[in-house]
Image (spheres, rainbow, N blue to C red):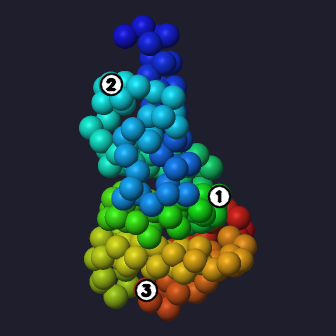
C-alpha cells in the first residue's frame, strides 16, 4: 500500500465513522443501514465493505479515538483517565446518550469497559489494605464511573466535569476505602 492509498484508507474510514456518529444522534441505531452511512459519508457500499463487516464493526472501530483521548493528556498515569473520560463524554454527550439508549448499548458498554478497565488497573496499587483483588477494584471503579456518567449525561444541564470527578472520588473513597490517585487537575 502506498502512502497515498494509506491516506485514502484513513480518510474513508474517518468519513464512515463520522457519518455513523452524525446519523445516530438523529436516528435510532436500529434503523440505520449501511446504505444510510455510505450516503452520508459519500462512500460506495463496496468501499464500506472493504473496511468493515457491518455497522457494528464500524461502531467498534470508533473506540480507538476514545482510547487515544484517554492517553493523550499524559494524565493517563494514576487516575487522570477519570477526568479525561468525563471530558470526552461531555464533548460527545449527544452521541453517548443516543448510543446508550439503542441496541448498540452492549457494544458501547463492552468497548468502554475494556478501555476504562485497563486504565483503572494501571491506576490502582497492586494490593489494597483489605485484600480486595486489584481486578475487582478496577471493575467496581469502572462500573461506578459509567453509572455516574450515565446519570450525569441524562440531565438537561450537566454539572462541570470537576464536580462530577469530585463526586466520583467521594464515591470511590466510600466504596473502596481510599480514592484512586488524584489527577493533575486536582493538584
**Can I make out residue 177 in this image?**
yes
Q: Residue at x 53, y 87 (%)?
A: 171
How many C-alpha atoms fall within 10 Å of the one at disc 3: few (<14), some, or many (≥20)? some
Position above or below: 17 against 63: above
Calculate the distance from the C-alpha at mark 3 to the C-alpha at mark 2.
Answer: 51 Å
CB under 8 Å between discs 3 and 1: no
Q: Residue at x 47, y 10 (%)?
A: 3
Q: Does 100 sit left or right of 18 as displayed?
A: left
Position above or below: 101 against 108: below
How many C-alpha atoms fall within 10 Å of the one at disc 2: few (<14), some, or many (≥20)? few
Residue 106 position within the rendered picture, expressed as x and y whole percent measured from the top left? 32, 65
Lower sequence index among marks 2 and 1: 2
Return the residue nearer the eye: 127 or 123: 123
- Where residue 91 is drawn, which disc sits there? 1
Helix, strand or loop at label 3? It is helix
Q: Does 107 sit left or right of 150 as displayed?
A: left
Return the residue nearer the eye: 144 or 78: 144
User: Which residue lies most toward the top here?
Assistant: 2
Q: What residue would you read off at disc 3?
A: 176
Return the residue nearer the eye: 100 or 161: 100
Q: Residue at x 60, y 58 (%)?
A: 92
Q: Quarter of the image holding residue 157?
A: bottom right
Helix, strand or loop at label 2? It is helix
How many C-alpha atoms fall within 10 Å of the one at disc 1: few (<14), some, or many (≥20)? few
Residue 61 position within the rendered picture, expressed as x and y whole percent measured from the top left? 39, 43
Q: Does 180 sit left or right of 139 as displayed?
A: right
Lower sequence index among marks 3 and 1: 1
- Where residue 28 is drawn, which disc sits there? none
Q: Residue at x 63, y 80 (%)?
A: 155
Residue 44 position within the rendered picture, expressed as x and y whole percent measured from the top left? 41, 25
Residue 100 position within the rendered picture, expressed as x and y whole percent measured from the top left? 44, 68
Q: What residue would you read off at disc 2?
A: 46
Amino acid at each position: 500500500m502506498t502512502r497515498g492509498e494509506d491516506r485514502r484508507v484513513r480518510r474513508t474510514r474517518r468519513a464512515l465513522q463520522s457519518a455513523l456518529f452524525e446519523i445516530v444522534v438523529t436516528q435510532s441505531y436500529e434503523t440505520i443501514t449501511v446504505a444510510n452511512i455510505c450516503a452520508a459519508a459519500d462512500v460506495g457500499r463496496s468501499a464500506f465493505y472493504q473496511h468493515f463487516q457491518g455497522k457494528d464493526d464500524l461502531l467498534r472501530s470508533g473506540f480507538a479515538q476514545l482510547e487515544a483521548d484517554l492517553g493523550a493528556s499524559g494524565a493517563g498515569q494514576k487516575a487522570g483517565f477519570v477526568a479525561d473520560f468525563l471530558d470526552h463524554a461531555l464533548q460527545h454527550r449527544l452521541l453517548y446518550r443516543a448510543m446508550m439508549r439503542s441496541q448498540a448499548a452492549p457494544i458501547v458498554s463492552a468497548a468502554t469497559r475494556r478501555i476504562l478497565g485497563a486504565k483503572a488497573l494501571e491506576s490502582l496499587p497492586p494490593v489494597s489494605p483489605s485484600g480486595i483483588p486489584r481486578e475487582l477494584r478496577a471493575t467496581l471503579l469502572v462500573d461506578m464511573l459509567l453509572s455516574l456518567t450515565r446519570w450525569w449525561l441524562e440531565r438537561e444541564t450537566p454539572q462541570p466535569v470537576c464536580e462530577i470527578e469530585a463526586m466520583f472520588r467521594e464515591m470511590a473513597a466510600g466504596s473502596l476505602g481510599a480514592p484512586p490517585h488524584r489527577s493533575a487537575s486536582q493538584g
